[in-house]
Image (cartoon, rainbow, N blue to C red):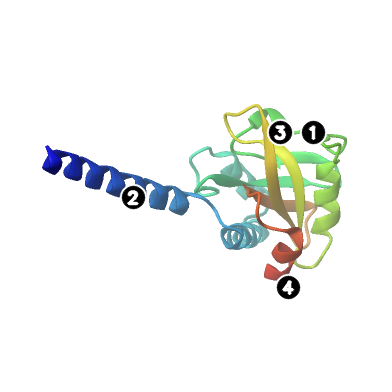
Amino acid sequence: MKFIRLTYSMVLFFFISFSNHSLAEDRATPEDIIKKVYEAAAFLSQADESGLETFNEKNGRWVFKDTYVFVFDCSKGNIVAHPIKPTLLGRNLMGLKDVRGNFFFAQLCDAAKKPEGGWVEYWWPKVGEKKPSRKVSLLFQIPNTSYQVGSGIYDDNVTIKNLEKLIK
């Protein structure tokens, strides 16, 4: 009986350890966001308008780990490409507020004016959930276009100050 309990405990320990490790690998980090956003900007700089459709692919290269890259047009205030919520396409979102009253798309557009782009904190539901959670997103202006690319993570521990240091 002791052997069975010991074996069960060991299996349970390894399962939990592997699951937590696996979950950690599936969560995007701020560094992942920076890399993917800058990669997306370089891609769209080369591909131009013809590359926009790739950002709408739910299983495409711009959906990674537990997040995705979206394309925004601050001059028009609307989402140009979004792989998870196609209902947002073409909608003017500059007046959209999170649950704390932040006009976060307007804030993202202001942040994107910085040479390296900028980070914004807001409250937005995770995919498949209704309750908003703290999200931080980076928005970056694609040179010589009216488009910005962005991506974000749900993280209660990172600060905007520390995130800004990562892109300088």
Q: Are marks 2 and 1 in contact (CB under 8 Å)?
A: no
Mark 4–mark 1 Cα distance, whole angstroms, equals: 30 Å
Using the image, tell me which numbered label, if any, was put on residue 99.
Answer: 1
Residue that mark 2 sits on: 18
Q: Are marks 4 and 3 in contact (CB under 8 Å)?
A: no
Residue at the (54%, 53%) spot, across then down: 28
**Which percent across, then down, holds residue 91?**
78, 32
Q: Secondary structure at mark 2?
A: helix
Report the residue that reaches farthest toward the bottom: 168
Residue at the (65%, 54%) spot, across then down: 157
Q: Earlier in the sequence, mark 1 or mark 3?
A: 3
Q: Earlier in the sequence, mark 2 or mark 1?
A: 2
Residue at the (67%, 57%) spot, across then down: 158
Q: Earlier in the sequence, mark 3 or mark 2?
A: 2
Front of the two marks 1 and 3: 1
126 versus 39 height, above or below: above
Mark 3–mark 2 Cα distance, whole angstroms, equals: 38 Å
Residue that mark 4 sits on: 168
Q: Amino acid at mark 4?
A: Lys
Q: Secondary structure at mark 3?
A: loop
| Screen quadrant of the C terminus | bottom right
Residue that mark 3 sits on: 89
Q: Are marks 4 and 1 in contact (CB under 8 Å)?
A: no
**Which percent across, then down, holds residue 139?**
73, 54
